[in-house]
Amino acid sequence: MSIKNNLLKIKSSLPENVTLVAVSKTKPITDLMEAYHAGQRIFGENKIQEMTEKWEQMPKDIQWHMIGHIQTNKVKFMAPYVSLVHGIDSLKLLEEINKQALKNNRIIDCLLQIHIAEEETKFGLNEDELDNLLGSESFINLKNIKIVGLMGMATFTENQTQIKKEFEHLKSIFDKLQNLESNSLHFNILSMGMSGDYELAIKCGSTMVRIGSSIFGGR
Ligand SMILES: *Cc1c(COP(=O)(O)O)cnc(C)c1O
């Protein structure tokens, strides 16, 4: 199957309220352009340098999402153009994004990454850390970032029951925060689901899926 066919097939299977992020990390620009010509405008990358090189060379109506773990010292390279940052897991990182957004006269949309998986290796905040972050004075003073939702990754397992439990957990945190009235929260995005588990994620309430290998092939 071609990239175009993969993309169109997945797109047609998604409910209307679910946004597709085409995860193009490690793939060459020719592959991304094939998806672009098939109508895709949202691409996800996990390295700031690679994303910036692609941004420089590709059409400017593309929305670039940073989905990977972020090094604070690289934030400045994406601040002029990034459209959504998925993997926020510390106040320090948010402060740096706020600072660089201010320099660029922008407000940058961000998702807080929540640790829902069993594996130690998956990044993200636990619920205590989340509460501490949202309640802190310094967070409330950040005017150039906007928290628009949550992101999470389930455990890499065949066990559907476990994956479902993790997605439902994330959805319950999302619902709780969405019901909080707050000036600094504008919750409408729940980013969960990848090639192997996005159908289940959608059943559990995902509004944004990040799909790479099912569109572009293995890496
Ligand atoms: C690579 C990656 C994806 C896409 O994974 P696939 O299994 O190729 O769909 C989604 N989210 C994150 C955070 C990733 O790093």
Image (spheres, rainbow, N blue to C red):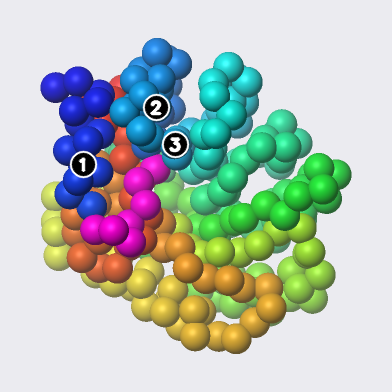
Q: Are marks 1 and 3 in contact (CB under 8 Å)?
A: no
- Picture residue at 70% right of the left edge, 58% below the top: 145
In the rendered image, which residue does mark 3 sit on? 41
Upstream in sequence: badge 2 or badge 3: 2
**Looking at the image, can residue 152 be seen?**
no
Q: Find residue 10 and name its label.
A: 1
* Quadrant holding the N terminus: top left
Residues at marks 1 and 2, CA–CA distance in whole angstroms: 15 Å
Instruction: Tell me if mark 3 has few (under 14), some (14-19) or many (20+) residues whose alpha carbon lies within 10 angstroms of its own.
Output: some
Q: Position of residue 4 (x, y in %)?
A: 25, 26
Residue 33 in which image quadrant: top left
- Tell me: is circle 1 under 8 Å from ligand 1: no
Residues at marks 1 and 3, CA–CA distance in whole angstroms: 15 Å
Q: Find residue 38 and name its label.
A: none
Give the amino acid type for the residue marked by disc 3 in the picture. Arg
Q: Position of residue 190 (x, y in %)?
A: 41, 63
Upstream in sequence: badge 1 or badge 2: 1
Q: Position of residue 9 (x, y in %)?
A: 17, 38
Position of 137 relative to 40 (above/below): below
Give the amino acid type for the residue marked by disc 2 in the picture. Tyr
Q: Find residue 36 and name its label.
A: 2
Instruction: Tell me if mark 2 has few (under 14), some (14-19) or many (20+) residues whose alpha carbon lies within 10 angstroms of its own.
Output: some
Q: How many marks?
A: 3
Q: Is residue 51 left or right of residue 104?
A: left
Q: Are marks 1 and 2 in contact (CB under 8 Å)?
A: no
- Picture residue at 39% right of the left edge, 27% below the top: 36
Of helix, strand and loop, which one carries label 2?
helix
